[in-house]
Amino acid sequence: MTDRPQRILVIDDEPENQLLIRTILRGEGYEVETRDDGVSGLAVLERERFDLVLLDVMMPDLNGLQVFERMQSNERLRCVPVIMLTALAQRRDYEQALALGVKDYITKPFEPSELIVRLRAAMTCITKESADV
């Protein structure tokens, strides 16, 4: 295991959301990158390694579910945990995302403490899975 900060990619088309999430996560010691659309998010995922992706669902061009499906079709990106962070609060949206394999689904607006707890839980799960292999 390395001592490097865990890296999180935030893909959200709203600059205010990016700033808020980046501020919260950096305050907890995470290294945070942001992208404002699915296309540029996938491009940076191809070039760089991230420990987790926070992914908005409603975005222009590629929506979050499309981004996630493309990640799942890529051998290297398939194991990167994804938490959907979205204003879509319908049960069917939540169920669809979880059925596809996202680690968690958080609705906006969210409490910063809830975001941190759920993010840590998703990352702990991945750390344990890696140790079991």
Image (cartoon, helix red, strand yellow):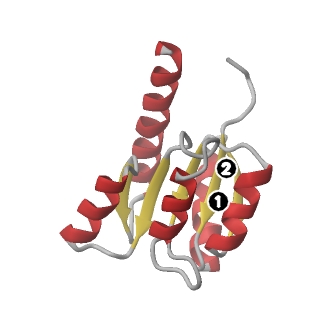
Relative placement, left or right, of 94 versus 108 is: left
Q: List the single residue furthest toward the top.
A: 132
Task: Check the image and report above or below for 65 versus 30.
Answer: below
Task: Check the image and report above or below for 18 versus 44.
Answer: below
Q: List the single residue furthest toward the bottom.
A: 60
Q: Which disc number belongs to residue 26?
A: 2
Q: Residues within 10 Å of mark 1 (few under 14, many from 20)?
A: many
Which image quadrant for residue 6? Answer: top right
| Viewer-nearest residue: 112 or 15 | 15
| Viewer-nearest residue: 30 or 75 | 75
Q: Which residue is mark 1?
A: 22
Distance from the alpha carbon under mark 1 to that under mark 2: 6 Å
Residue 9: % across, % down = 65, 55
Which residue corresponds to the image point at 43% horizontal and 60% vertical from the top-left?
84
Task: Check the image and report above or below for 108 versus 31.
Answer: below
Residue 64: % across, % down = 49, 69
Disc 2 marks a residue whose amino acid type is Arg
Which residue corresponds to the image point at 48% horizontal and 31% vertical from the top-left?
126
Q: Please report contact status of discs 1 and 2: CB closer than 8 Å, yes or no.
A: yes
- Indicate the secondary structure of the residue bearing disc 1: helix
Which image quadrant for residue 65? Answer: bottom left
Relative placement, left or right, of 91 versus 28 is: left
Which residue corresponds to the image point at 53% horizontal and 57% vertical from the top-left?
54
Q: Which disc number belongs to residue 133?
A: none
Which residue corresponds to the image point at 45% horizontal and 53% vertical from the top-left?
83
